[in-house]
Every structure is written in C-alpha cells, then in structure tokens.
Image (cartoon, rainbow, N blue to C red):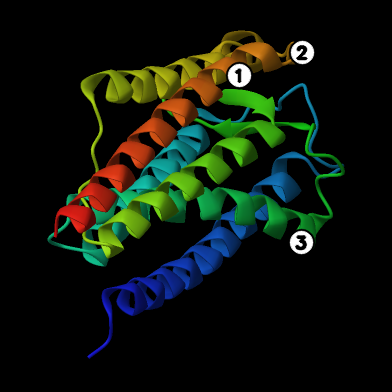
Amino acid sequence: MPTLIAVTRRRLLWLSVFTIAMAQLEAAVVVYLRTIFYPDGFEFPLVIIEDHVAAIEVGREAATVLMFLALAKLYSAGDRWRQYAAFLWAFGLWDILYYLWLWVMLRWLSSLLEFDVLFLIPLPWIGPVLAPVLISLVMMGAGWAILSLRDRELPVLVTKMEWAITVGGAISLIVLFMSDAESVVAGDMPRPFRWFVFALFLLLPLAAAQRAYRRSSDAGDRRSIQA
C-alpha cells in the first residue's frame, strides 16, 4: 500500500509533466504570433492587433486558467487544500517554463529584466519578466508547503488577517502590472518598473504564508506530543 507521501509525489510528477507540455504549447502559440506581428523580433512599442485577434488571445488565456483549475480539481477531488496547492504549483511552474521554452525556440529573452506583456485579463499586464518569475517561485513554494502539511495529515491554519494580506497583495500586484496598460496600448514605452512597491506587495503575503505554515506545523507537533 503506497504511503500518502508517495502518492503525492507521483501525482505531483504527472502534474508537472502536464505543465511542461502545456508551457511548450503556450510558447509555440506565442512564437507564431510574434512571427506574424513582430517579424523583426518582439519589442515595445506594441503593434496594435485586430480586435478579433485580441479577443481570441483573451479567450486563450482564460482557457489556460480554466484548464489548471480543472486539473487541480482532478488532482484531489476531496481535499480543497490539495486542490489549491496543486493549482499554485502547476501555474507557477507553467509560467517559469513558458519563458524557458521561449528561450529555447526564439533565444528570447536575453535578460530577465526585459519587459513583456505578461497577461491580458482584464487589461494588459506589463512588467519585467523577473517579476512574474519571482511570483511563480512563491506560488510553487506555497503549494509545496501546503502539500507537506496535508501529507502529515495536518490542518492548514490560516487566519482571516493572513487571508486578507494574501488576497490584498495579489490584487495590488495585478493593479501594479496593469498601471501602464492604457499608455502602452496607446503606443508609449513602459515606465520604469516600481520594484519597491512590487517587493512590498510580494513580501507581505509571503510573510503571512510563513506564519500560517509555522502555526499549522506547530499544531501538528503539539498533537504528536499529546498523543
């Protein structure tokens, strides 16, 4: 009978395999788009594409998120925390591997500080590639931490304040990425990225997550001592 940890590792392996393949498909689509709209290589200012093409791109990105949500649901149908962890792990890994595949296919980018259009929903997200990579690493770490707690059959103890900090930080990061959307779409160059603001909105949720993990782990230790 396989242990719970062995089952988690096997599932996580196949989840990662799917993510690797999904990142390759996403990168391939972007290669085609850049060949059409940026034959001399991607750079700002942006080329204005037709509305119907833009709508298709928005639909593709929404479909990608739905695919990861469905995959996370299938990962563990009876444990919402495992589902949440699976989504965090898969989405974070996918985002990192997407840029790795772009480098393999196009030898782009030359630096993680290069700007890119990161996402399109609800408005274009603009920022240096390093920013989403750092967020993705935090997401993967959080996913791994949650799975480690559940493998030890421990509850995930998160206070309302920690949830508020996490959700508020995530929304603030999205707003930060979209702050240049109107001007960039109008043909302007992106403004210098506000790294201090980015670090603030990333580190606060990270600190809240670490506190929740320690609390959950300590609760398990106390339970073991009492037993």
Looking at the image, which residue is at 79% across and 32% down?
Answer: 114
| Gap in angstroms between the C-alphas marked 3 and 2 | 28 Å
Name which residue type carries label 3. Answer: Met
Q: Earlier in the sequence, mark 3 or mark 2?
A: 3
Q: Is residue 70 visible?
A: no
The numbered mark at residue 198 is 1
The image's mark for residue 141 is none
Q: Is residue 143 left or right of residue 4?
A: right
Where is residue 165 shown, x and y percent of the image? 37, 19
* Mark 2: secondary structure: loop
Q: Is residue 202 above or below residue 132?
A: above
Cα distance in 3D space between marks 2 and 1: 12 Å
Above or below residue 218? Residue 70 is below
Q: Which residue in the structure is indicated by mark 2?
A: 192
Which residue was labeled with disc 3? 105
Q: Amino acid at mark 2?
A: Pro
- What's under tag 1, amino acid-wise? Phe
Query: Whole-percent x and y of residue 91?
Result: 46, 50
